Image (cartoon, rainbow, N blue to C red):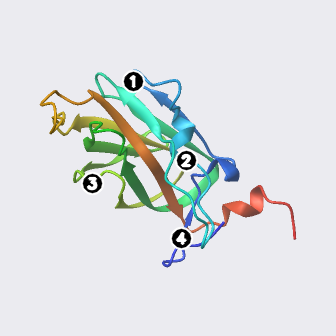
Amino acid sequence: MTAAADGLQNAAQTTLGATATFTGAPNNKDWPANGAIPAEPKPGQRGGLRGGCMFGAPMENGTILVHLIVPCEIERVDLMQLDYHGTMNVKRAEISVDGKVLKTVDLEELPGKYQEIPLAAKGQLVSIKCLDTFPRHTDAKTGKPGPNWGGWARIRVMVKDDVAQFVLPPE
Protein backbone atom coordinates (compact mmCIF):
# COMPACT_ATOMS: atom_id res chain seq x y z
CA MET A 1 0.00 0.00 0.00
CA THR A 2 1.52 3.29 -1.07
CA ALA A 3 1.38 6.22 1.33
CA ALA A 4 0.21 9.59 0.05
CA ALA A 5 2.45 12.63 0.32
CA ASP A 6 0.75 13.47 3.64
CA GLY A 7 1.54 10.00 5.05
CA LEU A 8 -2.05 8.80 4.80
CA GLN A 9 -3.03 5.54 3.14
CA ASN A 10 -6.18 4.54 1.30
CA ALA A 11 -7.86 1.77 3.30
CA ALA A 12 -10.79 1.55 0.86
CA GLN A 13 -9.25 -0.93 -1.58
CA THR A 14 -10.55 -4.39 -2.38
CA THR A 15 -6.95 -5.62 -2.29
CA LEU A 16 -6.84 -4.57 1.39
CA GLY A 17 -9.99 -6.45 2.30
CA ALA A 18 -12.40 -3.53 1.92
CA THR A 19 -15.79 -4.18 0.35
CA ALA A 20 -18.57 -1.89 -0.77
CA THR A 21 -22.31 -2.31 -1.00
CA PHE A 22 -25.05 -0.07 -2.33
CA THR A 23 -28.54 0.83 -1.18
CA GLY A 24 -31.24 3.50 -1.52
CA ALA A 25 -31.46 3.86 -5.32
CA PRO A 26 -31.30 1.64 -8.39
CA ASN A 27 -27.76 0.31 -8.92
CA ASN A 28 -26.42 -0.83 -12.29
CA LYS A 29 -25.43 -4.51 -11.82
CA ASP A 30 -22.57 -4.07 -14.29
CA TRP A 31 -21.15 -1.16 -12.25
CA PRO A 32 -21.37 -2.47 -8.64
CA ALA A 33 -20.24 -0.64 -5.52
CA ASN A 34 -16.90 -2.52 -5.36
CA GLY A 35 -16.02 -0.85 -8.69
CA ALA A 36 -15.42 2.42 -6.81
CA ILE A 37 -12.76 0.96 -4.48
CA PRO A 38 -10.22 -0.90 -6.64
CA ALA A 39 -6.52 -1.24 -5.87
CA GLU A 40 -4.54 1.99 -6.07
CA PRO A 41 -2.14 2.08 -9.00
CA LYS A 42 1.48 1.59 -8.05
CA PRO A 43 3.86 4.52 -8.61
CA GLY A 44 4.67 4.74 -12.31
CA GLN A 45 1.94 2.24 -13.23
CA ARG A 46 0.03 3.13 -16.35
CA GLY A 47 -3.59 2.44 -16.92
CA GLY A 48 -6.81 4.30 -17.43
CA LEU A 49 -9.48 5.04 -14.91
CA ARG A 50 -11.96 2.24 -15.44
CA GLY A 51 -15.01 1.16 -13.54
CA GLY A 52 -16.81 2.86 -10.72
CA CYS A 53 -20.28 2.55 -9.21
CA MET A 54 -23.23 3.67 -11.34
CA PHE A 55 -26.67 4.34 -9.91
CA GLY A 56 -29.74 6.43 -10.35
CA ALA A 57 -32.94 7.40 -11.94
CA PRO A 58 -33.23 8.87 -9.35
CA MET A 59 -29.78 9.26 -7.77
CA GLU A 60 -31.01 10.91 -4.58
CA ASN A 61 -30.74 8.67 -1.48
CA GLY A 62 -28.31 6.37 -3.28
CA THR A 63 -25.81 5.33 -0.62
CA ILE A 64 -22.53 3.51 -1.03
CA LEU A 65 -21.26 1.78 2.09
CA VAL A 66 -17.53 1.12 2.29
CA HIS A 67 -16.67 -1.62 4.78
CA LEU A 68 -13.03 -1.42 5.93
CA ILE A 69 -11.32 -4.60 7.12
CA VAL A 70 -10.61 -3.09 10.58
CA PRO A 71 -11.64 0.11 12.40
CA CYS A 72 -9.29 2.93 11.38
CA GLU A 73 -8.40 6.51 12.28
CA ILE A 74 -10.01 8.26 9.31
CA GLU A 75 -8.52 11.62 8.34
CA ARG A 76 -10.16 12.26 4.99
CA VAL A 77 -12.59 10.91 2.42
CA ASP A 78 -11.77 11.55 -1.25
CA LEU A 79 -14.67 11.45 -3.70
CA MET A 80 -14.42 11.32 -7.49
CA GLN A 81 -17.60 11.77 -9.53
CA LEU A 82 -18.13 9.46 -12.47
CA ASP A 83 -17.00 10.83 -15.85
CA TYR A 84 -18.81 8.61 -18.35
CA HIS A 85 -20.69 9.88 -21.41
CA GLY A 86 -22.24 12.93 -19.73
CA THR A 87 -23.59 11.19 -16.64
CA MET A 88 -25.09 13.24 -13.83
CA ASN A 89 -22.97 14.15 -10.81
CA VAL A 90 -23.59 14.23 -7.08
CA LYS A 91 -23.87 17.83 -5.88
CA ARG A 92 -24.47 17.31 -2.15
CA ALA A 93 -23.44 14.27 -0.12
CA GLU A 94 -23.80 13.13 3.45
CA ILE A 95 -20.85 11.27 4.98
CA SER A 96 -21.32 8.93 7.95
CA VAL A 97 -18.96 6.71 9.91
CA ASP A 98 -20.39 3.70 11.74
CA GLY A 99 -23.90 5.10 11.30
CA LYS A 100 -23.19 8.58 12.68
CA VAL A 101 -23.61 11.47 10.24
CA LEU A 102 -20.43 13.54 10.44
CA LYS A 103 -20.59 15.87 7.48
CA THR A 104 -22.79 17.17 4.69
CA VAL A 105 -20.71 18.51 1.82
CA ASP A 106 -21.41 20.52 -1.31
CA LEU A 107 -19.26 19.22 -4.15
CA GLU A 108 -18.11 21.00 -7.27
CA GLU A 109 -18.96 19.44 -10.60
CA LEU A 110 -15.52 17.98 -11.31
CA PRO A 111 -16.01 14.50 -12.77
CA GLY A 112 -12.81 12.46 -12.91
CA LYS A 113 -11.05 14.56 -10.25
CA TYR A 114 -10.76 13.83 -6.53
CA GLN A 115 -12.42 16.18 -4.06
CA GLU A 116 -10.88 15.83 -0.60
CA ILE A 117 -13.15 16.07 2.45
CA PRO A 118 -11.37 16.35 5.82
CA LEU A 119 -12.92 14.03 8.39
CA ALA A 120 -11.66 13.13 11.85
CA ALA A 121 -13.26 9.86 12.94
CA LYS A 122 -12.54 6.33 14.02
CA GLY A 123 -14.60 3.62 12.43
CA GLN A 124 -15.02 0.75 10.02
CA LEU A 125 -18.14 1.55 7.97
CA VAL A 126 -18.06 4.73 5.85
CA SER A 127 -21.21 5.67 3.97
CA ILE A 128 -21.68 8.35 1.34
CA LYS A 129 -25.28 9.27 0.56
CA CYS A 130 -26.35 11.37 -2.43
CA LEU A 131 -28.63 14.18 -1.26
CA ASP A 132 -28.79 16.21 -4.47
CA THR A 133 -27.42 16.22 -8.02
CA PHE A 134 -26.31 18.73 -10.58
CA PRO A 135 -28.82 19.13 -13.46
CA ARG A 136 -28.76 16.71 -16.37
CA HIS A 137 -26.37 17.62 -19.14
CA THR A 138 -27.53 18.39 -22.67
CA ASP A 139 -25.72 16.82 -25.62
CA ALA A 140 -24.10 19.72 -27.52
CA LYS A 141 -24.54 18.03 -30.91
CA THR A 142 -28.08 16.70 -30.64
CA GLY A 143 -29.60 18.97 -28.00
CA LYS A 144 -31.01 15.88 -26.28
CA PRO A 145 -30.82 15.47 -22.51
CA GLY A 146 -28.04 13.29 -21.19
CA PRO A 147 -28.40 10.34 -18.85
CA ASN A 148 -30.47 10.71 -15.68
CA TRP A 149 -28.03 8.51 -13.74
CA GLY A 150 -24.41 8.79 -12.62
CA GLY A 151 -22.26 7.70 -9.73
CA TRP A 152 -18.80 7.53 -8.22
CA ALA A 153 -15.66 6.76 -10.20
CA ARG A 154 -13.56 6.33 -7.06
CA ILE A 155 -13.87 6.62 -3.30
CA ARG A 156 -10.86 6.72 -1.01
CA VAL A 157 -10.88 6.50 2.77
CA MET A 158 -7.57 8.00 3.86
CA VAL A 159 -6.27 6.72 7.19
CA LYS A 160 -3.23 6.87 9.44
CA ASP A 161 -3.31 3.12 10.05
CA ASP A 162 -1.23 0.54 8.18
CA VAL A 163 -4.12 -1.65 7.03
CA ALA A 164 -1.85 -3.74 4.77
CA GLN A 165 -0.40 -5.50 7.82
CA PHE A 166 -3.73 -7.29 8.24
CA VAL A 167 -3.93 -8.71 4.72
CA LEU A 168 -0.48 -8.97 3.18
CA PRO A 169 1.86 -11.89 3.85
CA PRO A 170 4.96 -11.05 5.87
CA GLU A 171 8.03 -10.20 3.86
Q: Say whether disc 1 or disc 2 marks the residue closer to the N-terminus.
A: 1
Q: Residues within 10 Å of mark 2 (few under 14, many from 20)?
A: many
Q: Residue at x 19, y 40 (%)?
A: 134
The residues tagged by marks 2 and 3 sit, at their Cα atoms, a distance apart of 19 Å
Q: What is the number of the mark on residue 155?
A: none
**The N terminus sits in image quarter:** bottom right
- In the image, what residue type sits under mark 2? Ile
Quarter of the image where one finds residue 63: top left
* Up/down of 127 relative to 116, above or below: above
**The C terminus sits in image quarter:** bottom right
Q: Which residue is label 1 attached to?
A: 24
* Badge nearest the viewer, 1 or 3: 3
Position in image of residue 161 (x %, y %): 62, 66
* Badge nearest the viewer, 3 or 4: 3
SS class of the residue under badge 1? loop
**CB under 8 Å between discs 1 and 4:** no
Q: What is the number of the mark on residue 110?
A: 3
Q: Which residue is label 4 attached to?
A: 8
Q: Say whether disc 2 or disc 4 marks the residue closer to the N-terminus.
A: 4
SS class of the residue under badge 2? loop
Q: Say whether disc 1 or disc 3 marks the residue closer to the N-terminus.
A: 1
- In the image, what residue type sits under mark 1? Gly
The residues tagged by marks 2 and 4 sit, at their Cα atoms, a distance apart of 16 Å
Q: What is the number of the mark on residue 37?
A: 2
18 with respect to 117 (left or right):
right
- In the image, what residue type sits under mark 4? Leu
